[in-house]
Image (cartoon, rainbow, N blue to C red):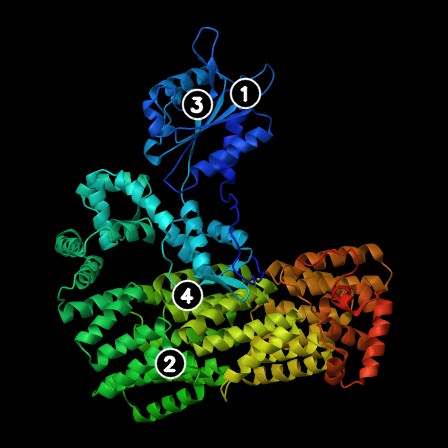
Amino acid sequence: MKTTSPDRPRPRRSWPLLGRDAELAEAGRAIDDPRRGGVWVTGPSGTGRSRLAQECWERAGRRGHPRLRVTATAAARSVPLGALAPLLRRGPDGTPALDTEAAPGRRRPVLLLDDAHHLDGASARLLTSWLQGRRIALVATADAADAAAPWPEHALHAVRLGALPQAVVGELLERVLDGAVERRTVRVLHETSGGRPRDLRELVDDAVRRRTLVPEGPLWRLVAPLTAPPRLLALIESRLRRLDPPHSAFLQRLAVCGRLALGSAERASAEVLADEGWLRFVAEGPRQCAEPAGPLYRQVLRAGLPAQRIRRILRDQAARSRALDPGPAGLLRSVCWRLEAADAVDPGELEQAVALARRAQDHAVTLRLARELAQVRPHARTLLLLAEELYEGGHPREAERTVRRALEEATEDDDRLFAVALHVQSLAFGLLRVDEALDVNSAALRAFAGHPEVAVLRANEAALWSLLGDVRRAGRALREVAAAPGTPAAALVAVPRVYCLTEAGRTGDAVRAARQARARRRAEAGADTMAHPTLLLGAEARALAESGALAAAEELARQGYDRAVDAGAGRAQTWLSEHLGWICYLGGRLGESRVWYSSVLAHAREVGLRSGEWVGLCGQALTAAVCGEVDRAELWWEQARSLRPGRWWRPEAALVSAWLAAATGRASRARDELAAAAAEASRRGLRTAASHLWCDAARLGAAQQAVAPLTELADGSDSALAASRADLARALATGRTGPLERSAGRLASLGAGLLAAEAWNAAATVHTRAGAGVPARTARERALALAGPGGARTPGLVPPAVRCRLTARELDVALAAASGLSSEEIARRLSLAVRTVVNHVQRICAKLEINDRKLLPTAVHRLPGEPAAG
């Protein structure tokens, strides 16, 4: 993942060919094999047939093949030899002959023939004779409808192109835009383009031009819905005009309805259209359905239909679906179609459809239906349903207004209790008014004492204390929750329970609890309440990460993020981005961590999720501080502190403050802050956080002090990461190369690259002081390799030669100066005289053999001639 920060939209540039390495290699072997006739490239329109064929042709030229090129066109098809005419000369017998012949012992010419499906008959016969005589190797492209090569006897290697996977689309976008791209944006562009390179390019170029796709901080992201550019629409429309009427009629129905269960009458037509890339098949339980291959095709098809025709299709399909698709999915689609056709829908049926959409975890559809239901039945229960969907969809302000309406309408205790519960969630997790949320929840616990559903409020209390960073109090609240499986309280309490187990050091129990909760939800028939299921995936990923399984944690969190984006679950998307930011931070991949935290911040600000905004700001400040970017870190941190509630205590805040102090040469202050925060974390039951805080204190010079608490924390935890942190502190305290190198190996095996790099660097420093040059260089090289991209500039990565030349005070001043601070600012922060700082800087420059203070950032973090980390 790229992490550069573009300043402005970049101009158009050539797009690289990615994701086709296997096809290119196979094609190259076929061209060089004299027993084969060449390569036949097919695939749906827009998949890059011509681009791949041209790359094959150019590579063949670089291998010594003479190159020829022609394009067959529909216009030239009526002219005998019209396609091949540019290549021909009159032969000795008066017949057409190839103008370029292969000399004896030389490679045969390679002919690139684009759009071979337009080839006229005479050209096809002549080409056949050339292939029979092995006089050429052919690289031909053709429409997907003509997938079979017309010369089977000449062993053409068939290459059929399909859509690019999302991972390749993400890499392609980063290459073209020269920067990181938000994963949600990648997913939207992949879905909209259908993974077709041509459509992707048109969409991206148009979105950049319209400023719909813009750089925000370190990443590019979509800030408005995509619109199809005119050129791409014209290409799709021209293809539509060539379709047979029955196929066109079926596509129109599909475009209007979105997804259709296939009957026997439509199956044959659907298979042809799927082969040509117009639609894709989707399994829906035992039934096979079809849907358009992307929003673009649906948009173009619908745009050409009159409104009356669209309503007629919707009504007809709604009537047909009752017989063809009588299951829950069919009922849900029928209700949506009738609403779109402006037909009346029975409120009871609409309510049933809302429940079905919720069970399918499709928040976009559920929200649309919930709005309709709230208009038809503006009762407390339906308003609560709408408020909940707004909250889960990431619209906390509108959710708060709606839940207040529900409270005004509520006449029964059940409705009032659930309205208060959602009000508390919205206040705390949406708007970050945690103190007010606690007061409201406490008052409700007194008011509803003895109510059968009071467990919902107890679950809220546990969630609030876990948000405030007090696991002990959250644990006490959890023990008071008696929630039966399938109830709203059980759904609400699942995530804080996993979080509390993780922070208590019981990461194995946390993972098991998350998996059991997910299994129960899958087995339950009812819909989830106030917690999208992907939030549990995030909690499980966090537990896996803290256990030391960083790779598995990241993969699970990415799956959850994609599911949340697809479902329109904005709140879950925000928190899964936060988990991914933290997982990358634990792995030492600071550039990727910064991108994820930037995504958290951008999305949270977009929807008004204040708790997500605080997390994003804090994450940005932390990664910037560890990278030595003091000005940026302080800017982010000042904004984060302005949002923090009164009773809020989070270990991340201590990490930001400490690493800011370290980046400005105040290592002693950083160690003191980390030790104090670790003690507070232990008091609150945050054993995992305490382990992290003590480890960072050890990295900044307090290894002797950190050994005992880290060992005690590791002994009380099942986390391999906590155990490895204790090992690192012991190795740093002993200062011996053997323990340091063993610690580095264990940390690297967990994926904690930055910690492993610092351990190797510490070993290199010990070797350097002992005069062992070769082992020192080897250890330093391993440290640089593990530090990875992202620009970490921690004291633990300072080159051994620099550490050996500078005193402790000089190193503090050097780090502060390298971060960009002036002598006056360094003097203020380190409580020194300005003249003293100036003298220190002069001595540091002399010892490091540099003549300009501006060179300090490089000299302090990298030796002359040494490669940059990452």
The residue that mark 2 highlights is: 425
The answer, for residue 167, to whether it is visible in the render is: yes
Decide which of tag 3 and tag 1 comes sooner along the chain: 1
Q: Are discs 2 and 3 less than 8 Å apart at CB? A: no
- Whole-Å distance between the Cαs marked 2 and 3? 66 Å
Q: Nearer the viewer, residue 363 or 595?
A: 595
- Whole-Å distance between the Cαs marked 1 and 4? 61 Å
Q: Are discs 1 and 4 less than 8 Å apart at CB? A: no
Q: Are discs 3 and 1 less than 8 Å apart at CB? A: no
Q: Amino acid at mark 3?
A: Ala
Decide which of tag 4 and tag 2 comes sooner along the chain: 2
- Whole-Å distance between the Cαs marked 4 and 2? 24 Å
Label disc, if present, on residue 515 of the rendered structure? 4
Q: Are discs 4 and 2 less than 8 Å apart at CB? A: no
**Which residue is at 55% across, 29% downward?**
60
Q: Amino acid at mark 2?
A: Gln
Crowd tier of the residue under label 1, counting other residues whose Cα lies within 10 Å: few below 14, some 14–19, many 20 or above? many
* Residue 87 on image: x %, y %: 47, 21
Front of the two marks 2 and 3: 3
The residue that mark 1 highlights is: 108
